Amino acid sequence: MIRAYWKLAKTSFKRQMIYRAANLAGIATNLCWGFFRAYLLLAVLEASPGVGGYDHDSIIIYTGFSQALTAPLKVFGWWDLLRTIKSGEIISDFCKPIDFYGMWYARDCGHAVYQLVARGLPLMLLFLAIFRIPLRLSASMGLAFLISMTLALQISFSWRMIYNAMAFWTLDAKGVAAMANIVSLFLMGFIIPVGFFPPWLQQAVQLTPFPAMFDIPLAILMDVPGTEVLLLLSRQVFWMLILIIAARCLLHIGTKKVVIQGG
């Protein structure tokens, strides 16, 4: 079974390699948009020094990191499962001798790994080089960051599965999915840093799974105190388990009875 998941992830990875020109264009687009966001946030920082605990270097790291994760986390939406439910193609997936959730996760992992290596890493390095920002990470913090990123990708995937699964109960779930995606974009701190939120909103956001998708890996990347790392990682593990259970429950309920319209 593990071999089947590995092959699915490998195939997904290779599929992304076909679109090299598109990935290069994506790097250029993310870089230009990132410059705009960076200077906009630096202007905010100049008007309100120390806002959210950020300084010049941390703003650049935040901007570069957010642009680097645009593709791996599919932050602007993912509708693949929704489309297969709507078209009826999902029936072919049910016929495969493999766990439905695991199959989609393996595909997502292949895509995410390629986008991290071929797009995310070059973007982050370009930002650091252009703005001459040193990134000081010890070996232990680097390991913690890799663990945090792995958890963030899993949490993001489960959240996307949850809002895509709404298509089991509606004729067109794009509206629900789009709203869920907008909410997560804002609350994970992707549009503006969570540290810029009012104190009451920061406290409310920390009670949701969204910071675990982006804000926690960012905090570790910016070298939070070592005593806080285990607490942050434990929060990610908690939300990962909750969302996996929620996604699997929805899929189990939704797939008990599926009626394919028109065929």
Image (tube, rainbow, N blue to C red):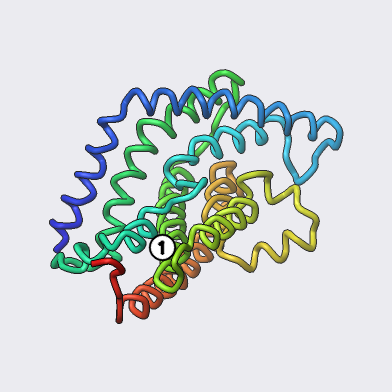
The residue wearing badge 1 is 161
* Above or below: residue 13 compared with residue 201: above
Which one is in front, 199 or 228? 199
Q: Quadrant of the C terminus?
A: bottom left
Q: Position of residue 42 (x, y in %)?
A: 74, 30
Above or below, 89 against 99 in this view is: above
Which element carries disc 1, helix, strand or loop? helix
Of 63 and 61, the residue lying toward us: 63
Q: Is residue 229 visible?
A: no
Task: Decide if residue 215 is on the left or right side of residue 104.
Answer: right
Residue 96, placed above or below residue 68: below
Is 60 or 78 nearer to us in this picture?
78
Quadrant of residue 5 in the image? bottom left
Q: Nearer the viewer, residue 149 or 181?
A: 181
Q: Position of residue 100 (x, y in %)?
A: 26, 66
Residue 158 visible in rendering: yes
Instruction: Name the residue rendered at 21%, 63% in the picture.
Output: 93
Residue 56 image position (x, y, % from top left): 71, 30
Q: State the residue at coordinates (31%, 26%).
A: 20
Amino acid tagged 1: Met
Question: Residue at the spot x=46%, y=73% of the render?
Answer: 242
Position of residue 167 measured from the top left corner of the image (x, y, whole percent) = 42, 66
Decide if residue 65 is on the left or right side of residue 140.
Answer: right
The crowd level at tag 1 (other Cα within 10 Å; few <14, some 14-19, many 20+) is: many
State the residue at coordinates (55%, 59%).
Answer: 175
Where, quadrant-wise, is the N terminus in this rendering? bottom left
Q: How many marks?
A: 1
Furthest residue toward right: 47
